[in-house]
Every structure is written in C-alpha cells, then in structure tokens.
Amino acid sequence: MQLGDYLKSGIDVFGDAYEYLMAMYASNAGKSGGEFFTPQEVSELLAKIALHGQESVNKVYDPCCGSGSLLLQFSKVLGDKNVSKGYFGQEINLTTYNLCRINMFLHDINYSKFHIAHGDTLLDPKHEDDEPFDAIVSNPPYSTKWVGDSNPILINDERFSKAGVLAPKNAADLAFTMHMLSYLSNQGTAAIVEFPGVLYRGNSEAKIREYLVTENVIDCVIALPDNLFFGTSIATCILVLKKNKKDDTTLFIDASKEFVKEGKKNKLKERNREKILQTYIERKEVKHFCALANMEKIKQNDCNLSVNRYVEQEDTKEAIDIKALNSEISQIVKKQSALRNRLDLIIKELEA
C-alpha cells in the first residue's frame, strides 16, 4: 500500500470512528443528542433521493446542519469530486457548529470546500448571495419556536412572502421548508425530514401548504416508521421538493412498516431504504404502499398531505365467513334448546 493510500485509509477510519462516537452519544443523550445527529441510514436515504437523476451537483446545503452527517453523505454517495463547489451549512448552536467543522476535517473534506456558518438560519441566513443549490437535505428541529409574525418585517422577506403568511410562532417547521425552497435551484431537489403535523395542521400552515401545492413543488411525501430518531419516538416523514416537475402529481409512500427493530430503536436496513428509493424513482402505484395524486385531488382534500389520505391501508382483520358463522350459531341454539329441555325433565323428576 502506498503512503497516500494509507493516509487516506487512516482519515476514513478517523472520520467513521468520530461519527460512531457521535451516534453513541446521541443514543445515550436522548432528546439533546437528536438535536445534532441524524442516523446514518436516514442520511443516506435523503442524499440518494436528493441526488436522483444527478451525476454531479454544484453545491449541497443543509440549513440546520448539526454535526454535518447529512452533508457528508453526499461525499460518500456521489464522491467529493462530483460536488464541484462544496458543502454549505448553517448551525445555530456554537458547540454543534464546531463539531460539524471537526467532522468535515476528519472526513478529509478540504477546508476550501466546506462553508459552515454559525447563526440563526431563519433570522440571519447565510449563503444567500450564493447561486441556488442543486441538492438540499435537512432534519430541522421539530415544531421549534421562532419570532414569526411578532416581527412584521419578516412577511416581506422574499423567502416567506410568496406564501402570504408566516409559519406560526410555536412551530417553525414550514418556515424552514420555505427557506429551503427559496435556496433550491430550478433543476435541484430538496429532501427534508418533517414533523407529521406540518402535513395536516390548519391556519397559517394550511395556507403555506396550499401555496406549495399550487406552485407544484411537492414531488413526494414519505411516511417513515416511528422510533427512528434519537430524542423522539414519533413517526416522522420526508417531504421532497422540486421546481421542475414533469407533471402535477405527487407521490405518497407509506414506509411506516419498513424497519427492523434493533434494541430500543427501529432501523431502516438496506433493503428498506432500497425499496423506498426504487419506489420514489419508478413512481408507480403499489396497492397499500404508494399512490399518486394530482393537484386537483390534493386540493379536494384541502391540501392535507397526510399519506394515509391517499394510500389505502391494508385490512389485516381476519375475513369472516358469514354462512359458517350463522351455521355455528344455529348449532349452538339447538344445543341450548336440548339442554333446556333436559333440565326441565330433571326438575320434574325431582319434584315428583
């Protein structure tokens, strides 16, 4: 082995060891651990969805990058040379921001190719002067609070103004979604882990969903199994956004049963991830697993994007044979009548 190969191998080992230690910490830290680390199998699925149809990309972006595990999947899936202008991210927590930078170094990402900023993505966005991104992935904090309409200037922000309303102050989920859509290139794809409430909650969130549906940017909604993430057992979902859709259909995938239980957590194994990815790529309806819905149908459902609105649930109840059941009841009634007659005879004999 040449020295260069040895050094590269050593760097890969250090990087993988660092991610392993972070995964172990996240597992033991509960809710706080989930704030900076996305499980690798979920990261890989998001990256492959965002990269579908693209052999190379200009730049990749995560506005809530945590430890950088999502961004690094692009290097693993596509190869560093095929991410021409680098890896961009922003992280509000200073400690986690530094963890991300260390993670980049340990995975041999050249300093000139990663651009990680510290700050509040919604109120102080970085990288906004850069060209739009071909691939965006993120696992933003679920239903986190933000200033919302308490700051009247925000409604004029070009990231949020097109929807006509701001995400509610107690749930910034769709504010992050609108932010990512505004940073997405015309040929790009965004794959976002979302809290399920954003798919059906009313008021301002319903109006933002209506905007997204009308703009025809919702490519796919994937219901994930519960208990996948550190810090929450809630079943999350993936929202896939594209600006260059070929038609007005949205694919809904019910992957809630695609997991293997390992210890206390559920895991997306390779066969589960591959099934979800191939279903996304092929876009063919599969009974009880995925369905296509056009814009008209989604609007008829008041822009409710819950997967179970479109994918018929499989009836797992045992089929009942009515004729056999009636026959059994008839036999029971006859036996009951015979027993009653016999009991009457016994009583008469005792009274005699």
Image (tube, grey):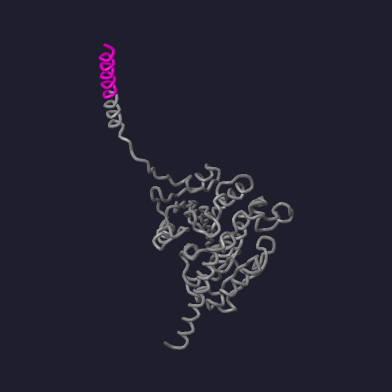
Q: Is residue 19 left or right of residue 165?
A: left
Task: Judge whether residue 170 is colored magenta.
Answer: no
Q: Quadrant of the N terminus?
A: bottom left
Counting the numbered discs, the total is 0
Q: Quadrant of the C terminus?
A: top left
Question: Is any atom of residue 164 visible in this view?
Answer: no
Position above or below: 135 against 315: below
Q: Main secondary structure of the magenta part?
A: helix
Q: Nearer the viewer, residue 91 or 31?
A: 31
Q: Residue at x 56, y 53 (%)?
A: 195
- Residue 329 in percent (x, y) is at 30, 27
Q: Quadrant of residue 325?
A: top left
Q: Nearer the viewer, residue 145 or 121?
A: 145
Q: Quadrant of residue 255?
A: bottom left
- Residue 258 in percent (x, y) is at 42, 55
- Residue 278 in percent (x, y) is at 41, 59
Question: Is any atom of residue 306 visible in this view?
Answer: yes
- Residue 68 in percent (x, y) is at 56, 69
Position above or below: 101 against 120: below
Magenta region: which residues? 334-352
Q: Nearer the viewer, residue 258 or 181?
A: 258
Q: Residue at x 57, y 49 (%)?
A: 197
Q: Is residue 325 left or right of residue 159?
A: left
Extreme residue in the bottom direction: 3
Q: Is residue 237 left or right of residue 289?
A: right
Task: Judge whether residue 341 is colored magenta.
Answer: yes
Q: Residue at x 46, y 46 (%)?
A: 310
